[in-house]
Each structure stands twice: as C-alpha cells, then as structure tokens.
Amino acid sequence: MKNAPLKALTLALGLFASAVFAADAPLKIGTTAAFAIPLETAVAEAEKQGLKVELVEFTDWIAPNVSLAAGDIDVNYFQHIPFLENAKAAAGFDLVPFAPGIINNVGLYSKKYKSFAELPEGATVAIANDPINAGRGLQLLAKAGLLTLKPGVGYKATEDDILTNPKDINIIQVEAVQLVRAYDDADLVQGYPAYIRQAKSFDATSAILFDGLDHPEYVIQFVIQPKSKTDPRLIKFVDIYQHSPVVRAALDKANGTLYQPGWKN
C-alpha cells in the first residue's frame, strides 16, 4: 500500500500531461483523397465539440506513414492492416492500428463484357501493382473463378501463387489510383469505387463482382505511434467518426452502398 500515493501521483501527472498536450495543439490527421470528405465532416463536428483537428491530405500512399513515424502528424487514416504490415516490414515503422474505420468494396469492372463467361481467351486484366492491393485483386479473380491460388496465401498472394488460369488471362499491374484509366483499354479491371467516382468516367456500382466483407482485414484503420494510444483527443475524434449521425450521413453520401462500418455500434 505504501506505493499507492506514488501511483496516484503518476496517474495524475499523466492525465495532466495529456490535458496540456491536447490543449496546446490540434490533432493532426493524415489521409488521402479517397477518405477526405467524410473526415472533413468529422473535423467540423469535432470543432463544434471543442476539439481542434487539422486534416492533412497526402497525394500518395507512402508519405502518410513516413509523416506519422516522424511525428509530423498524430494519426493517419488511409490504410488497412495488410498494407500497414507491409509498410512496417519494408521501412521498420513502429506504428499500430488504433481503431477501425470503414471497409470499402473493391470490384471487377469491364467496359466490354457483362459476365466473366464472356471474357475471351487471353483477356487482359488490370490489377493493382503494389504488393497488398495486388493480392486483393488476385483473391477477387479467384472468387470470380478466373484462376486458383495456392491454399492459404491470402492477401500475400502474388502471380507466382497462381495454380490454374483456365482462360489464360493476361494480368497487367497498374498503380491502384490509375486503374480507373485502364477501364477503356483492358478487358477487366480491379476497381476502387472512391477513385471511380472522382474520375466520373463510369458507374462505380457497375462491377460484375464485389469482394464485400469477404476479407475483414481490409477495414481501413486509424493508425498511430504506440505512445498515442491514450491521447484523449484521438479517443474523442474516433468516437465522433464512428457514432456521429452527421458523419454517417457524409459516409453514405460519399460511398453510397459500397462500404460498411468496420466497428460494432
């Protein structure tokens, strides 16, 4: 019991430090264009509740983790756990998921064909070129019956893991944000509804097949440095994002029916 006062003092100092930290600076959140608009709504809601938040929008998928690891932002929101694990392995980042956001559907789209059965032998299929989203594309092609993969490879699948390819499809890899441009040329394209909507070139709901909730590992995460897990600003903002009716309406407007919340209400 003689250590109880010390523990109480430590807790009090920790709470005081958190309060000072929260009061001194806005919570800085890094994101990309695909997630920015609903986050802007959450930022506005947070400010109504006295929480200052600064949204930092990045144009690529590398800078948000570099910036977070350097301490230039407090949290980022643009990636799922497979992408995070790959980034950590590649760069040695000490980053962890804090809370789930939404999961976006990814689909297989075709300008020329309405079913997989119509695809010709040797059809050109465009998928993402980064290791994680390429694996998601390959899993989607397997779900479509266009190929089979080695058992258990999951999101780490590569073209080397293809066991059968009955139609001898020709897979080409394209930067994920540029896949929408491949729609006009390829026979089949892995597509991300958020980028399709931004391009306004075709109907984001027109995929032949979506992956839906088949792979919950693709839920987008709020990612932090481990030291930030008790940051009261962060806790409050995530609660607003997950539970504010205004934010949910913004998510519905931005994503339509092509997303699901990754958290339990």
Image (cartoon, rainbow, N blue to C red):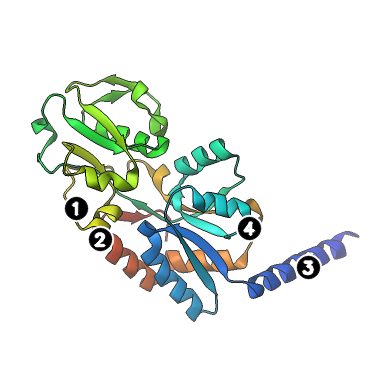
CA distance for labels 2 and 4: 32 Å
Seen in the picture, residue 166 relative to 138 is either above or below; the reply is above
Q: Residue at x 44, y 66 (%)?
A: 241
Q: Nearer the viewer, mark 3 or mark 1?
A: 1
Q: Is residue 20 left or right of residue 177?
A: right
Among numbered discs 2 and 1, the one appearing first in the sequence: 1
Q: Residues within 10 Å of mark 3 (few under 14, many from 20)?
A: few
Seen in the picture, residue 107 relative to 10 is either above or below; the reply is above
Residue type pointed to by label 4: Ser
Among numbered discs 2 and 4, the one appearing first in the sequence: 4
Residue marked by disc 2: 256
Asked if disc 3 and disc 1 are in contact, CB closer than 8 Å, the reply is no
Among numbered discs 2 and 3, the one appearing first in the sequence: 3
Q: Nearer the viewer, mark 3 or mark 4?
A: 4
Asked if disc 2 and disc 3 are in contact, CB closer than 8 Å, the reply is no
Q: Residues within 10 Å of mark 1 (few under 14, many from 20)?
A: some
Asked if disc 2 and disc 4 are in contact, CB closer than 8 Å, the reply is no
Residue type pointed to by label 1: Thr
**Secondary structure under badge 4?**
helix
CA distance for labels 2 and 3: 45 Å
Q: Which mark is residue 228?
A: 4
Seen in the picture, residue 67 relative to 183 is either above or below; the reply is below
CA distance for labels 1 and 4: 38 Å
Residue type pointed to by label 2: Gly
CA distance for labels 3 and 4: 16 Å
